[in-house]
Amino acid sequence: MALLYEKKGKIAYITINRPQAMNAFDPETFQELSNALIDFRDDDNLGAGIVTGAGEKAFCAGADIKTIIPYMAEHALYWQKVPTIMRGLELYKPLIAAVNGLALGGGLELALACDIRVASENARFGVPEVTLGLIPGWGGTQRLPRCVPWATAAEMLFTGKPISAQDAYRIGLVNRVVPPAELMPTAEAIARDILKVAPLAVKAAKQAMLRGTSVSLEEGLKIEADLEAPLFASEDLAEGRKAFTEKRKPEFKGR
Ligand code: CO8
């Protein structure tokens, strides 16, 4: 399988599994990514996801230059047929990228479309598309300047040169940098922290963040209010308030 999709408890694990090609996306792997993301979105038992790459060298070296780029050139609106978090798929459950090595091109764009990024010390981040004659077409030109300072994004996007994990941490591209052996435990610890809190609230928070990013503050506050309103009537809020009063941990049901 070019992509492994596993469920352990409430956590989904998506592992790009083409280490022989630095986990680059060929059409089959990309389709499997789309399928896994849709299942993750629709499975009510799942509350958080971790995306990583197989092997020790690469998280993902982006689009497969040999196969998927010519394929995409021939298939207009490919992203509509194969929607992913990079483009085409709305997904409001939290995703953590566990970046275990090179995250280049579409690989960095995949990590950028996740919510939280943890990097191993050997990770490197770059958007080398301009060295091929492309621009990052899976959201890189849009998400990178929204994530890191403009000048930093511009240098990365215009030169294609990668940056180290430590530099990625310094500019806020990743949440943590850890030794390789601690990468998955760290990502899982973050996932478990998310799973402790109210699931509907987490989904609403992500939706508010995503929808609010590209609108005015006024519109964003309206989106926030609309998403908050149903939470007041949720069983989870009643449980959260009750647990607070009773000085115990809440047991959220996602209702
Ligand atoms: N595509 C296809 N094969 C790849 C890719 C890739 N992106 N990256 C690595 N490979 C393959 C190599 O060809 C090689 O295969 P083989 O053994 O058969 O020759 C194998 O993986 C191992 O790679 P290297 O021998 O090159 O290993 P190194 O450690 O020397 O270098 C690098 C690793 C730095 C990752 C190097 O392979 C490299 O620069 N790869 C290309 C990275 C790149 O340019 N990525 C961006 C691709 S474009 C993209 O992602 C666009 C996304 C949006 C598309 C929207 C279109 C509309």
Image: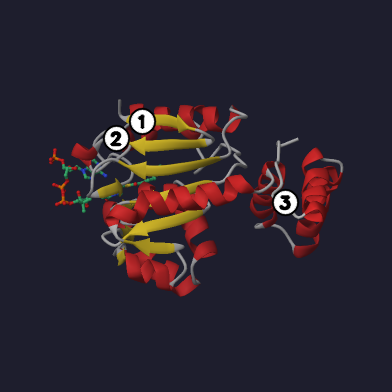
Q: Which residue is mark 1?
A: 4
Q: Which residue is mark 3?
A: 248
Pinpoint residue 7: horizontal percent, then vertical percent.
46, 31
Secondary structure beneath disc 3?
Answer: loop
Frontmost of labels 1 and 3 is: 3
- Which of pointers 2 and 1 lies earlier in the amino acid sequence? 1
Q: Which element is circle 1 on?
A: strand
Q: Among all residues in the image, which is located at the extreme left?
A: 20
Q: Position of residue 208 (x, y in %)?
A: 70, 52
| Separation of residues labelled 3 and 2 (CA atoms) | 42 Å
Q: Report helix, strand or loop for mark 2.
A: loop
Quadrant where the N terminus is found in the figure: top left
Amino acid under label 3? Answer: Arg
Q: Are marks 2 and 1 in contact (CB under 8 Å)?
A: yes
What amino acid type should be assigned to the residue bearing mark 2?
A: Asn
The residue that mark 2 highlights is 17
- Above or below, 237 against 153 in this view is above
**Residue at 33% over, 53% down:** 103
Foreground pick, 83 / 72: 83
